[in-house]
Image (spheres, grey):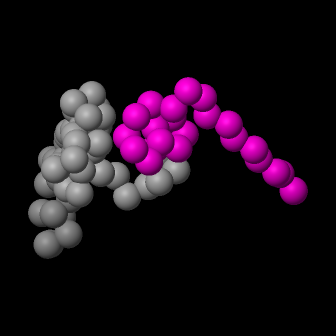
Amino acid sequence: MAITRSAGHMPGFITYLMSIYICSYLLGLIAQKLVIKLKLDRHPLLSDFFRFDTPWFYLLKGFNDEGDEADFVKLAVTVK
């Protein structure tokens, strides 16, 4: 009996979960683009809060340790 009543709410529950998932993805993507565009992750006072904890992100995007853009990015990969 309880399973039958719960099954009726399943489409609404799945819709709710999918909407939460899609909204969180879009908000995270927009927030990341804003941080990069406004250079908040390289600001002297705000970088501790906004800097991404992934050094490889900055390396592959071409930013050096001082926050300036690098002239080029060199990547050496060894595949076994």
Q: Position of residue 6 (x, y in %)?
A: 15, 63
- Is residue 66 shown to the viewer in this render? yes
Q: Is residue 53 magenta?
A: no
Quarter of the image that includes the C terminus: bottom right
- Is residue 15 shown to the viewer in this render? no
The residue shown at (60%, 29%) is 72
Quarter of the image that includes the N terminus: bottom left
Q: Residue furthest right?
A: 80
Q: Which residues are magenta?
A: 58-80
- Residue in front for this viewpoint, 18 or 42: 42
- Residue in front for this viewpoint, 75 or 18: 75
Q: Position of residue 57 (x, y in %)?
A: 47, 45
The quarter of the displayed image where residue 40 is located: top left
Q: Position of residue 18 (x, y in %)?
A: 25, 45
Q: Is the stretch drawn in magenta largely helix, strand or loop? A: loop
- Vertical side of 34 occupied by 9: above or below: below
The residue shown at (20%, 69%) is 3
- Vertical side of 6 occupied by 55: above or below: above
* Left or right, residue 28 beside residue 56: left
